[in-house]
Amino acid sequence: MLAEIKGLNEECGVFGIWGHEKAAEVAYYGLHALQHRGQEGAGIVTSDGESLNLHKGSGLINEVFEQDEFARLKGSAALGHVRYATQGGGGYENVQPLVFRSQKESMALAHNGNLVNAYALKHQLEAQGSILQTTSDTEVLAHLIKRSGHLQMDEAIIQALSMIKGAYAFALLTEKQMYVALDPRGLRPLSLGMLGGAYVVSSETCAFDVIGASYLREVKPGELLIIDDNGVTSKTFASPMARTLCSMEYVYFSRPDSDLNGSNVHASRKKMGKELAKEAPIEADVVTGVPDSSISAAIGFSEASGIPYELGLIKNRYVGRTFIQPSQELREQGVKMKLSAVRGIVEGKRVVMVDDSIVRGTTSKRIVRLLKEAGASEVHVRIASPPIENPCYYGIDTSTKGELIASNHKVEEIRELIGADSLSYLTTDGLENSIVTEKESLEHGICNACFTGNYPTEIYPETVLPVTKA
């Protein structure tokens, strides 16, 4: 469902293209396909071989760019970014790509993820005389590259990457080359494709379909790609490790028409729904999903349970973002503006409401109320992921346990709080069975830290915000 409704957001989407005469325009359409990953800022920088040209701003991609902007964004290489503000907060200075200009070689940088040791590195850089221009953790990499002392850019990047920890899918553009890197655990998604003779990189494969590009492969964990007019060169900057791609990419963030680790997201979500139906059966008359990310799981639940699937909830696609909500009463209307219950479908029925996750519980409570106000006799909530009990430090905006209802309440307590007649979550095993085809394979591991508390990397104390109780 809409990020603004749910209150769960991921940091951003990265898109790059090298070797296309209309690079800026292609990047624009690629970012459109990634708009769900970030809606607070967007930017595109191009290279014409001699200089970098940037345009960025706050808002949606179609709010930031107008037709006359593309005449200024000259060049056959482009790097684009859509952002949701987590690490570093909002503000124009944090909108990416970030551009750093120097006498020898300028560079633009775009990043998806979160560096867990950014605070310590910033302190070190400032002590050495660096003046940071943003509050984003992304800027750290640029300073580390420039301070490396290496004459070759790829060597400088590799040394800088060896110093950072956490989740990152980086794309870096200079006047002459594009560099692409994925963290050693592969926590964030990143793929390589081709459009005619041009190379493209994207946070999700759905962008390839939109622009007509063909998928080549995923960027490997710990891999640095160097893209220029001679093609693609691959280097390994970190020892291979078991991949732990964020499981919430499958559950919620990625578009259903994207592929992750060779698995289609829609198909994986359908499997989650089927597993959920096996683990938590219920007698009911109709199954409905919360638009949009839960529809696939709801279809799977319906197929496995034999309970008919219906559109019991409809999303209003013409409601803009509501920044001004001056009173609690108006805030309570937020869900009604974006979602409507279909009375003719749910009235007098026992409804299974399938959703992908519960974060703070406020949205689930409002949707249950919507369905009951529309006449549903019972509302049974089924969640196609395990309870989110732990903060994420890798680029999702759940930074304290106090924000997470499952960290402070048992399942039965949550059921009472949201007003459901029953509540069940998918187990961790059920989730892994849905999206992991080879549990021991380096190519198919997932990060379940938000469910289990087992983080795949070291978490530095300064990244952990004070824990509060709800």
Image: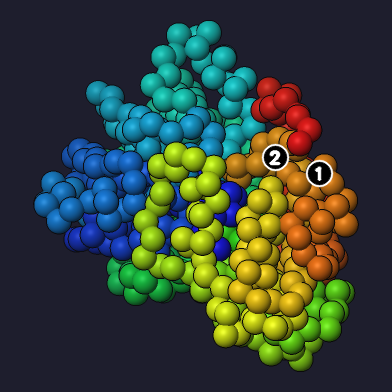
Residue kind at label 1, given as amino acid type: Ser
Determine the residue positioned at 70% across, 40% down. 403
Q: How far from the left and from the top, in percent, is residue 307? A: 74, 88
Q: How far from the left and from the top, in percent, is residue 75? A: 19, 51
Q: How far from the left and from the top, in percent, is residue 388? A: 75, 51
Q: How far from the left and from the top, in percent, is residue 426? A: 80, 66
Residue for badge 1: 407
Determine the residue positioned at 51% across, 15% down. 125
Residue 274 in view: no
* SS at mark 1 in the image: helix
- Within-10-Å neighbours for mark 2: few <14, some 14–19, many 20+: many
Please tell me the numbered disc located at residue 403. Answer: 2
| Colouring scheme, one of rainbow, by chain, secondary structure, one colour | rainbow
Please tell me the numbered disc located at residue 363. Answer: none
Image quadrant in which the C terminus is located: top right
* SS at mark 2 in the image: helix
Q: Would you place residue 466 above or below residue 66 in this image?
A: above
- Within-10-Å neighbours for mark 1: few <14, some 14–19, many 20+: many
Residue kind at label 2, given as amino acid type: Glu
